[in-house]
Image (cartoon, helix red, strand yellow):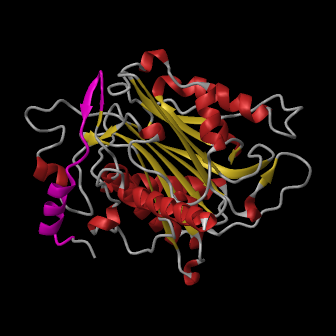
């Protein structure tokens, strides 16, 4: 009897966890629950970057007192050693106002040799140092003398009022890496999105995916975003920012700025050259949401392929790859545009209001958004 009760409690806990991931803890919902399903391609099982087999996501949310509102989001291309078993990768710069540690070597060599970390602006170097320390301690790394950690950021300095203290620690980084898993990904005001804002409301972490049909190759494309930028919000074509009067071009509003980091994963066997082309298309998805890549917005895309046929071992054998030809990447382009757009909506719709010594940034009012969407013919299905 006791065993049965324990199993029932565990099952209930799992259901509650799944409900929170899909609907939020305070009434938030993902875009599809609002009837917002950009594009024509189908999402994966979890509609998340982790639908790409092998990709893991871990997050640490750091909230201390009335001043620290930040965190770490870690994306691992696979469960092995990223240095010894490298994946082809590329970085695309939409607007270079930002600090993307390690990007030049990724584009020079066309490969990723570490997990990807997202954090706050002044914590980039501390996070990078902690990532290097963690990787050097892994088995097989005893003789490694050079390592290229990839760490991206957005500036959460309003809510993260103690940003100058650079509150991220090595323990926070290790926690995010240790918690990395497949399956549903927590969204909104969590991890590296704890203190961010987007379009004048609370932003954060969002994710989405697309799965191509067998005719188109059967590949999966997943996207994860850290949103912290401005513009005139458009949701699946509906003029939400304009209708709500919340955008940087109203008479009383100052110019908006910030950044957006977009991480793209796919199991399509792509070279770094075609991954750069895929990454550039993610900016089109960003544009569809209403961003104009303002002067202070650092907009970066990091793309990698997990396909076994394009892996790049650090040493030990001659590199032989089989990659998708140029003429067969159109569906991947479409997938990344659609998934980027939806991931950004998820980051907004799943975010909760956050308050700190720096002020309050409210969650987007979903009831009013539903009214605007309904007038545009977008309703829950």
Residue extending furthest toward the right: 316
**Front residue of 311 and 35:** 35
Find the residue positioned furthest to the left. Answer: 251
Does the magenta-highlighted stretch encompass residue 366? yes
Choose top left, top right, bottom left or bottom right for residue 41: bottom left
Residue 45, percent across and down?
Answer: 51, 70
- Left or right: where does residue 337 sit relative to residue 32? right
**Residue at x 84% of width, y 32% of height:** 144
Q: Is residue 370 left or right of residue 301?
A: left
> Closest to the observer: 185 or 203?
185
| Residue 89 point in image, percent of width and height | 64, 50
Where does the image place residue 90, in percent across and percent down from the top left?
A: 60, 48
Taking the magenta stretch, the answer to whether it contains residue 27 is no
Which region of the structure is painted magenta? Answer: 355-378
Q: Does 114 appear above or below 213? A: above
Outermost residue to the top: 165
Residue drawn at (32%, 32%) of the image: 295
């Amino acid at each position: 009897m006791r065993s049965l009760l324990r199993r029932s409690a565990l099952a209930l806990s799992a259901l509650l966890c799944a409900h929170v991931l899909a609907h939020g803890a305070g009434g938030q919902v993902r875009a599809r629950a609002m009837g917002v399903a950009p594009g024509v391609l189908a999402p994966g099982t979890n509609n998340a970057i982790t639908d790409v087999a092998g990709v893991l996501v871990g997050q640490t949310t750091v909230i201390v007192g009335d001043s620290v509102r930040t965190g770490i989001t870690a994306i691992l291309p696979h469960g092995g050693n990223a240095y010894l078993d490298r994946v082809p990768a590329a970085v695309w710069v939409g607007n270079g106002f930002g600090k993307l540690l390690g990007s030049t070597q990724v584009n020079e060599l066309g490969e990723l040799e570490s997990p990807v970390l997202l954090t706050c602006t002044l914590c980039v170097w501390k996070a990078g140092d902690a990532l290097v320390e963690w990787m050097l301690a892994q088995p097989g790394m005893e003789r490694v003398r050079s390592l290229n950690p990839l760490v991206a950021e957005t500036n959460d300095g309003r809510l993260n009022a103690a940003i100058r203290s650079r509150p991220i620690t090595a323990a926070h980084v290790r926690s995010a890496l240790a918690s990395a898993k497949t399956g549903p990904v927590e969204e909104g005001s969590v991890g590296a999105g704890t203190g961010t804002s987007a379009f004048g409301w609370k932003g954060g972490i969002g994710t989405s995916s697309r799965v191509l049909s067998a005719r188109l190759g059967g590949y999966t494309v997943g996207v994860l975003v850290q949103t912290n930028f401005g513009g005139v919000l458009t949701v699946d074509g509906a003029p939400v920012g304009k209708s709500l009067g919340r955008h940087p071009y109203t008479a009383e509003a100052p110019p908006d700025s910030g950044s957006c980091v977009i991480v793209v994963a796919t199991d399509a066997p792509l070279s770094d050259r075609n991954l750069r082309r895929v990454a550039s298309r993610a900016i089109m998805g960003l544009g569809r949401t209403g961003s104009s890549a303002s002067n202070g917005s650092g907009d970066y895309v990091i793309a990698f392929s997990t396909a076994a046929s394009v892996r790049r071992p650090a040493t030990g054998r001659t590199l032989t790859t089989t990659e998708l030809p140029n003429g067969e990447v159109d569906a991947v382009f479409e997938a990344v545009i659609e998934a980027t757009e939806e991931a950004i909506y998820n980051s907004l719709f799943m975010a909760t209001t956050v308050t700190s010594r720096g002020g309050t940034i409210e969650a987007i009012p979903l009831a009013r958004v539903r009214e605007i969407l309904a007038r545009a013919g977008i309703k829950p299905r």
